Image (cartoon, helix red, strand yellow):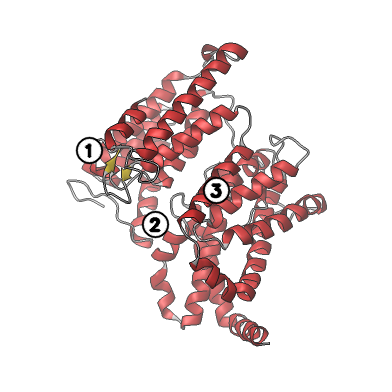
Amino acid sequence: VDIIANVAQGFGVALLPVNLLYCFIGVFIGTLVGVLPGIGPVSAMSLLLPITLAGTPESGIIMMAGIYYGSMYGGSTTSILVNIPGEAASVVTCLDGHEMALQGRAGPALGIAALGSFFAGTFAIVALMLVAPTLAIWAVAFGPAEYFSLMVLGLVVLTFLTQGSMAKALLMACVGAVLGLIGLDSITAQPRLTFDRLELYDGIGLVPVVMGLFGIAEVLANLERPIARKIIKTKLSQLWPNREDWKASAGPMARGTVLGFFLGILPGGGAVISSFASYALEKRLSKTSPAQASPKALCKPA
Amino acid sequence: MFVVWAGRDLGTGTVAAPGSGFLPFWAGLLMCAFALAVLWSAITKGGASVASLWVDVRWGSVVFMIASLAVYAALLDVLGFLLATIPLLLVLLRGVDPVRWRTAIPIALLSTVAVWWVLKRALLIQLPTGMFEIG
């Protein structure tokens, strides 16, 4: 009864017109900032923190949540339209989302990504409120062995995502792991693979790697063959998915929501592993080739 | 092989007490193993030759772009964001699929200043100002 009373009180505060306005402003600014590659939800929230000081604490928190969701969705927008993920969790959105955009279906792709995020996010928040006290006890017990298992899970998921040669995929996974090792050893503070360059002591961030692999690679790919240049010329219309899209997306949205919730509550897992695992699951269940762009792939939990 | 060597030099330690080089060493060995597997598969199964992948590629544009970006990366700290980015855009707009000067100059100037304004003024992100401290 306490929980229901608390939830009702929470909705009472959240649905005040002034708080809805703060939420709208947060989502709007968050989406604008999220579109910039390299500025993810956390940095967007840090940058925009001073804006929230104007209102009450509740309004501030609501606005921060809006910025978070907006910037997460902003990342999906660039993934779909220009094949450059705004942040790590949007990498999987590139795979089929951009393909849909090239087929002239950018509108439904953006719509499904937004609606999938909305449903999963809403469900996860309500479910989290109900099980938060139990989870708090569980989260404290999360130790090194569990984190190690989580990393192994990430690599296992990677093997699901591979198309073509497994050896090449695993080779690239190792290259990624080695890139992640560059910098100071977190235990002994010994510099690893830094070539005595001060810039490398802090490690190589995900953003430069993603920009290089997706952004610059896309530019070079467009340059090398003038005919193969892929520019989306269709109008951005019909954002709301049609009946077929809904039919195709409902199952993946539900599965992604549940999977994303359980992976998302694990400390350290977060949106990245959830989105990859969700895509891997749908790829396994899908009867069509992954190369055929499917709206199913966009229903990742945010 | 380089990663394996670097890992060995850092000290691999043991499984119970891994050293700083433990992960690079084993990751490097795995990379070697997978690279050999890829090589073996290429030899036995065949596939598209390296030359066929590069047919009709506009080498000049690609090399030009990479060289421009390398020069930009080197000059960014020295000249600062504004002074380095405007020439880069001008060079790219004129060098790759050339556009007219009348179009290139406004695009280079306006887009750079707009990006600078959003990052520096609106989002308060520190950008390199260079030795002339412009921007």
> Is circle 3 on the same chain as circle 2?
no
Q: Left or right? Give the position of A107 relative to A180.
A: right
Question: Which of A43 and A155 lies nearest the eye of the viewer?
Answer: A155
- The chain holding disc 3 is A
Q: Is residue B29 visible?
A: yes
Label annotation for residue A301: none
- Tell me the tag on residue A196: 1
Residue at 53% from the left image edge and 57% from the top image edge:
A270
Residue to which mark 3 is pinned? A78
Q: Secondary structure at mark 2?
A: helix
Q: Chain of mark 1?
A: A
How many numbered discs, if any? 3
Instruction: Check if mark 2 and mark 1 are on a common chain.
Output: no
Q: Which residue is mark 2?
A: B118
Q: Position of residue B92 (x, y in %)?
A: 39, 32
Local packing at callout 1 (Cα closer than 10 Å; few below 14, some 14-19, many 20+) is: few
Estimate how packed mark 2 is, as few (under 14), some (14 to 19) or many (20 or more) residues with alpha carbons within 10 Å. Answer: few
Where is residue A258? Give x, y as percent: 68, 60
| Amino acid found under the numbered disc labelled 1 | Asp
Residue A297 vertical position relative to residue A7 in the rendered view, above or below: above
Q: Secondary structure at mark 3?
A: helix
Callout 1 secondary element: loop
Determine the CA span between mark 2 and mark 1: 34 Å
**Circle 3 residues within 10 Å: few <14, some 14–19, many ≥20:** many
